Image (cartoon, rainbow, N blue to C red):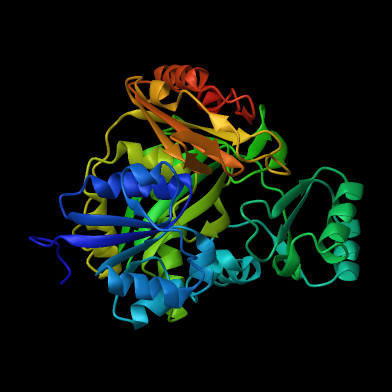
Amino acid sequence: MNKLKGVFLNILVIGSGGREHALCWAISKSTKCKNLYCIPGNAGIEEIAKCYNLNPSNKKEIYNFCNNYSIEFVVIGPEVHLEEGLSNYLISKKLKVFGPSREASKLETSKVFSKKFLKKNKIPTGDSEAFNNLKDSEIHIKSIKAPYVIKVDGLAAGKGVIICKTKNKALKTLNDIFIKNRYGKAGRKIIIEEFLEGFEISYFSFFDKDNILTFTYALDHKKAKNGDRGLNTGGMGAFTPSQKVSKKLENQILKQIILPTKKGLKNENIIYRGIIFFGLMITKEGPKVIEYNVRFGDPECQTILRNCNFDLLELLYATSTDSLKGKKVLLEKKNVICVVLASIGYPEKYKKGKIINGIEKAKKIDGVEIFHSGTIKEKNKFLSNGGRVLSVTAKAETIKLAREKAYEALKKINWKDGFYRNDIGIKNFK
């Protein structure tokens, strides 16, 4: 059954981050949601779903859980489990799944594949070359000018893109990848790419076998420190909308990037069911693809779902059953900001098990929702359990007011082992 009229589902969400908390939060609001489960979940998700500490990489264990708990619909959050083929496995067992197949996921899980795909389908992107050894990549670096963009081929938790301002830094990075094996199998192949100038946006679109439904966008902040300095992270904050993004630009993105992507997938005989998050650089020449992502972003998901004025569960289910035709997304015209509270030391070494106080006080501020990432609960207290720990979101009529609410909420959270950026959303004023 493709439509959910009169149908109530037992739903399983896979993942443990802020993205999955936001997905559970939105799904739990649906009148079609009967029982909501999450594997493995976190301390925040536990408040709205039944969490079980199972390993999502164990496909048989996940299927047995689905069987035992009469799960009818599975939503897969993290890209790593898509790469492992969890979607393929569960679909082969006759379950409905939101999340693309292992083959379709190569758009994200292999930078070399995605670059070939972009070039083959004449989709705007930066010039690049692929390498699988130190010698050839060093020769190439020495033949081009700085800055240099080096990307490892495989998944690296959002930290596999290194921008090097000097030749020495680029050569050291290549040594780290090929000799020190810093990225493991993800770094067996690399892309050296043209440095693009402009501003970045994360653009989201739902895909089923035959249809596309454009969704919305957010602007992400990837660097650890204020002023876009420091190391790359999985994302330290986001906001939506932006005065820089016009309807004309959105139409350009649809015609030059989204539609050719759909056509290219069809030409490759790849059926894609899920969401594509297009990482785009808006240059003077127009939008160009930096990367494909085959899932909701984090923290973009926490940001964009705050403005959803529709039944997300129904849309996710329609995507998984090739029923997107005629569907619409209704979005509130509000400004949303998300600020990530992370453990000091992230994205490198950090401590776990530190008490976090004040979350309930922060949540009481009008327009604020807090999504958990790396948290656990012991003796009725929240403890840190990861690098990115909380996503503090705020919704208001203006970005200025949304910023004020988010940072007011952050001041109420008492956690001396955490840090956050103070400049999330400032990009909107520049």
Q: Identify the residue shown where x is 42% and y is 31%.
A: 393
Residue 83 in sight: yes
Depth order, front residue of 413/25: 413
Question: Total label count?
Answer: 0
Q: Identify the residue shown where x is 50% and y is 65%.
A: 55
Residue 231 location, quadrant: top right
Image coords of residue 419 (percent x, y): 62, 28
Image coords of residue 232 (percent x, y): 68, 44
Q: Identify the residue shown where x is 57% and y is 72%.
A: 120
> Among all residues in the image, which is located at the extreme left?
6
The C terminus: image quadrant: top right
Q: Identify the residue shown where x is 34% and y is 21%.
A: 364
Image coords of residue 34 (percent x, y): 18, 56
Q: Is residue 400 above or below residue 269?
A: above
The N terminus: image quadrant: bottom left
Q: Is residue 109 above or below residue 298?
A: below
Q: Is residue 152 left or right of residue 207?
A: right
Image coords of residue 12 (percent x, y): 33, 61
Depth order, front residue of 205/87: 87
Q: Is residue 181 left or right of residue 46?
A: right
Residue 370 location, quadrant: top left
Q: Is residue 344 above or below residue 408?
A: below
